[in-house]
Image (cartoon, grey):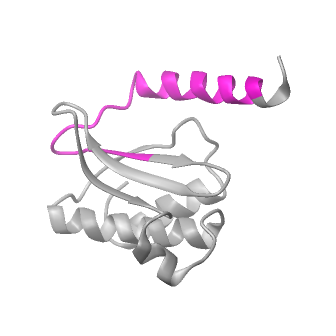
Amino acid sequence: MDKAKSKLLARKNRHSRVRKKVVGTPERPRLLVYRSLKNIYAQIIDDRAGITLVSASSMTASFKKELKKGNDVAAATLIGKQIAEAALEKGVKQVVFDRGGYCYHGRVKALAEAVREQGIQV
């Protein structure tokens, strides 16, 4: 097994272990983070109803007006602010943070801190 495949498999295993415990409810939905090499994505999900309440990514037109790159800490911070503002409009004040099997540093940490700064309890 090559290195890239084993890293992906390890991340998926970590994510499945976390998902056994982290569940989004209508009162406290799940904030999911996914990062690729070029972009970062975030969703707020109600797992009981099986719906996505809010989503934001570095591929949207509104994001590209402000920043060109979607794979750095500045991009993650902006996505965190965007998703927090959209969540507050929907009435979401608390979320459960699902880091998606990624280590809590860099872009994932920047996104979570940006959401907290906007007033959502993570």
Residue 102 is drawn in which quadrant? top right
Q: Say if 28 sits above or below 67 in the image.
A: above
Q: Which residue occupies 52% across, 70% down?
A: 77
Q: Position of residue 100 (x, y in %)?
A: 52, 38
Q: Say if 82 sits above or below 28 in the image.
A: below
Q: Residue furthest top?
A: 1
- Horizontally, residue 19 falls left or right of residue 90, namely right
Residue nearest the observer in this picture, 121 or 25: 25
Q: Position of residue 54 (x, y in %)?
A: 27, 55
Q: Position of residue 44 (x, y in %)?
A: 31, 49
Q: Which residue occupies 48% across, 28% down?
A: 18
Residue nearest the observer in this picture, 122 or 86: 86
Residue 21 is drawn in which quadrant? top left
Q: Which residue occupies 51% across, 61% down?
A: 111
Q: Residue furthest right?
A: 2
Q: Position of residue 98 (x, y in %)?
A: 44, 41
Does 102 appear in magenta? Answer: no
Does 25 appear in magenta? Answer: yes
The span shown in magenta is: 5-32
